[in-house]
Image (tube, coloured by chain):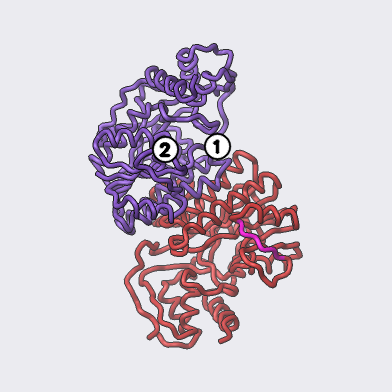
Chain colours: A red, B purple
Amino acid sequence: MKILVTGGAGFIGTNLCNELRSRGHEVIACDLYNTDRDDYIRCDVGKSRQIEKVFEQYGPFDYVYHLAAEYGRWNGEAYYENLWQTNMIGTKHMIRMQEKEKFRMIFFSSAEVYGDYAGEMTEAVMEENRIKDTYQMNDFAISKWAGELSCLNSANMFGTETVRVRPVNCYGPHEEYTPYRGFIPKFIFHALHGKPYTVFKGHKRIIDYVEDTCRTFANICENFKPGEVYNVGGRSEWEMDISEYSNLILGTVGVSESLVTYKESEPFTTKVKKMDFSKAVRDLKHDPKIDPKEGIKRAVEWMKWFYRL
Amino acid sequence: MKILVTGGAGFIGTNLCNELRSRGHEVIACDLYNTDRDDYIRCDVGKSRQIEKVFEQYGPFDYVYHLAAEYGRWNGEAYYENLWQTNMIGTKHMIRMQEKEKFRMIFFSSAEVYGDYAGEMTEAVMEENRIKDTYQMNDFAISKWAGELSCLNSANMFGTETVRVRPVNCYGPHEEYTPYRGFIPKFIFHALHGKPYTVFKGHKRIIDYVEDTCRTFANICENFKPGEVYNVGGRSEWEMDISEYSNLILGTVGVSESLVTYKESEPFTTKVKKMDFSKAVRDLKHDPKIDPKEGIKRAVEWMKWFYRL
């Protein structure tokens, strides 16, 4: 299969390209910057001409994994121009291309679309539940939900075939640290550099090791059901309080808790995210194998290597 | 009161400035283009620097009516880059300015946010109902709902004070014709120019004369309830089939039905929009006076004057 991965030099994108290539697919990656990679072309999906160039040079594609996005709540609030340009206008460019070229698309949404939903997040929640229970709480979340709706409208109007995925707390190798990253890379980076960090109390999360996730994402081509949407994340029995993850990281890195300041729960942030992944298990053979202890060990190793520590 | 009207040279904006000025308010208008108007400054709300210039030159403001937007379903699908830049990034620029400057804002959403909702559209529908019943069906609608959510999030996080309004089928003087306008200006323009047009059968609508609407919009400053949202439109007893509006227009202009091609119902378009305006009646003294017959007469007169017919 010939596959394009937008955002292919990013965290999930890099891992996904590795997984798809290991299965023998012909994979082209594109991302914002020039890189030293093979089978790669620079393309800002917010610029339609650059997308056209990718298709002229490498198309047609059977599948497009559309990962390119400005990521993260606070990043989206600070750099909302970039967020909307890439996440929404860029996605619309991809959809218009899809209407013409007829490839199948996998659109990467986010568990953030569920907003502050208090119950167990099944995919059906975003169809059946009371709207106000899932008001998205930041522009990143809003942009991802807007992208999902645009995919659905294109399917209705033009018969495009898209599967949407909603990853949650994916972590692991190839995730470089920025202040806008999730809590796992933040804690690891800070612990490795002896820098203090803050842990907000009372937030429970399930984390998902990226190689597990990417196996599941790669399986989508093998059982592609247009119109479907899947939560993808770790095992519910792996759920821990964020402070427990912090302790695990401190232990793995071998530094003391004195780096950590504990604060009461973070405002405007969901306390507990309880998600249901049974649909991905059923349709996509979703089967996370690497538990947080092992995954964090590997993530720490990767960061030590990457930052030459 | 000192008031800024973004999109102030547009259809509703022009009428709203007239109404606000007639009440003695100090009104500054801004819009995309240079014009011959007084108390006006060119500003593309998608460009933060241009907004800053408006505030430096004319601020501070007590109220901002944020009307500037790319309008219309098919316009939004054809020119989605402009849509998202103006409607979303532009709105976010205004919200960020509001967080700093603390003016009260009136955000112009649209009845399109209700999607294809089949029941009576009360404001509570967008809080209480099943999400899937109100999936927005095009990017214009999605962008307006996204804008509403951003206003709500800013109110929660920064205490900004905003009232949202959802106008529906507003028509009348100062609405210039483009192919992306609503059915009333389209039918009038075509009838006046002897050009054929299409009427899709089986769509019922209530139309609202712009001067009635703008009186209600102007009343918002006089009873401002932060966080509220209002449907604003005509009287339910004025509801008619689109073909009846067409007949009324043909009669007013004095041309024959032979201009019209009748087609089965338009795809991807709500058949009946049944809306509840009682909240605007209660809080904003909403009181539409000009019925469709009289309103269409005035709209026809205006177009004849504007197009020198």
Residue type at mark 1? Answer: Trp
Mark 2 is surrounded, within 10 Å at the Cα level, by few (under 14), some (14 to 19) or many (20 or more) other residues, namely: few
Element at label 2: loop
Q: As displayed, is residue B29 above or below residue A246?
A: above
Position of residue A97 in the picture relative to residue B68 (left or right): right
- Locate residue B17, reporting x and y percent: 34, 37
**On the image, which quarter does residue B129 sit in?**
top left
In the rendered image, which residue does mark 1 sit on? B74
Name the foreground residue: B84 vs B20.
B20
Q: Which residue is found at the position 37% from the left and 51% from the top?
A: B54
**On the image, which quarter does residue A215 sit in?**
bottom right
- Locate residue B55, reporting x and y percent: 35, 53
Q: Quadrant of the N terminus of chain A?
A: bottom right
Labels 2, 1: one chain: yes
Judging from the image, mark 1 belongs to the subunit labelled: B
**On the image, which quarter does residue B275 sit in?**
top left
Q: Can you tell which of label 2 and label 1 is closer to the viewer?
A: 2
* Region of the chain picked out in magenta, as a range: A40-45
